[in-house]
Image (cartoon, rainbow, N blue to C red):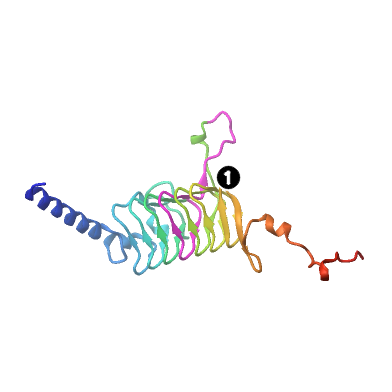
Amino acid sequence: MSFVKRAVGRMAHRWWAYVREAAAVSPAATGGYRFRSLGEGACISFPQGAIFGEQWIEIGPHTLVGERVSITAGMGPGVDLGPDPIVRIGGGCSIGRGSHIVGHQSIDIGDDVFTGPYVYITDQNHVYDDPETPIGRQWPRNRPVSIGAGSWIGTGAIILPGTRIGRQSVVAGGAVVRGEFPDHSVIAGVPAKVVRRHSPGLGWHSPSAIARTPLSPPHPAGRPAPLS
């Protein structure tokens, strides 16, 4: 490689690093003022994905949003969505590159939630009630989404409308999640279900372990307990 090519390469890398730093959205940057709330130390990395409806988006302190992440509130820019926030991302979160968070009614992501790349979270889905009308032309339905604090969402997971994930839970990569899941769950599959849980006294276990647990301790000396 020639000296000129190496020099140009170094300059290009330095220029790109400067652009990424300068174009990131933070509380002090011009773009940060458009958000309903953008906490201290929060950063939306450059290049950003589609971002609109900032007036209805809250992002907590020290949350890092990766490159090419889309965060939207509403169908498109310039729509009045009312007085309340639509998308709330807590503090200390990390949203993986290429993810989409698409809110229309309510998406609430707790503190310290981490996601892998290319996660899709939405509170709106198309309907197919009328078999004669194209599905894309039928009015969609909204249902709130909640992801508990301390949870991990694996790469490529899809969180559908109406989902409530408890705190300190794990969603496996590629899972398609809809429904309500308790705290301390491991959720996997298509459609997703609980494959492991944490319970006092049992620790982490499969859901069927509770059914296998004896209802009463064995009789001393290994003899069966008398019937009464």
> Residue at coordinates 42% horizontally, 58% vertically from top-left?
56
* Residue designated by label 1: 191
Q: Is residue 96 left or right of residue 176?
A: left
Q: Position of residue 45 (x, y in %)?
A: 31, 57
Using a 10 Å C-alpha cutoff, classify the residue at mark 1 as few (fewer than 14 neighbours), some (14 to 19) or many (20 or more): few
Q: Quadrant of residue 129?
A: top right
Residue 163 visible in the shown view: no
Q: Give the number of marks.
A: 1
Quick check: is 122 in the magenta stretch?
yes
* In the image: residue 227, left or right of residue 117: right
**Among all residues in the image, which is located at the extreme front?**
221
Question: Who is closer to the viewer here, 93 or 194?
Answer: 194
**Position in image of residue 216 (x %, y %):** 79, 66
Task: Report whether 54 appears left or right of 108.
Answer: left
- Mark 1 element type: loop
Residue 118 on image: x %, y %: 41, 49
On the rendered image, what quadrant is the C terminus found in?
bottom right
Residue 115 in view = yes
Q: Is residue 49 left or right of residue 56?
A: left
Question: Which residue extends farthest top?
Answer: 132
Magenta segment's dominant SS is loop
**Vertical comparison of 71 with 216: above or below:** above
Q: Is residue 75 magenta?
A: no
The quarter of the picture where residue 27 lies is bottom left
Considering depth in this image, is 22 or 220 the residue closer to the camera?
220
User: Which residue is the extreme one toward the right?
Assistant: 228
| On screen, residue 4 above or below 203 | above
Residue 212: x and y in percent read 73, 57
Q: Amino acid at mark 1?
A: Pro
Q: What is the span of residues highlighted in magenta in the rendered image? A: 104-133
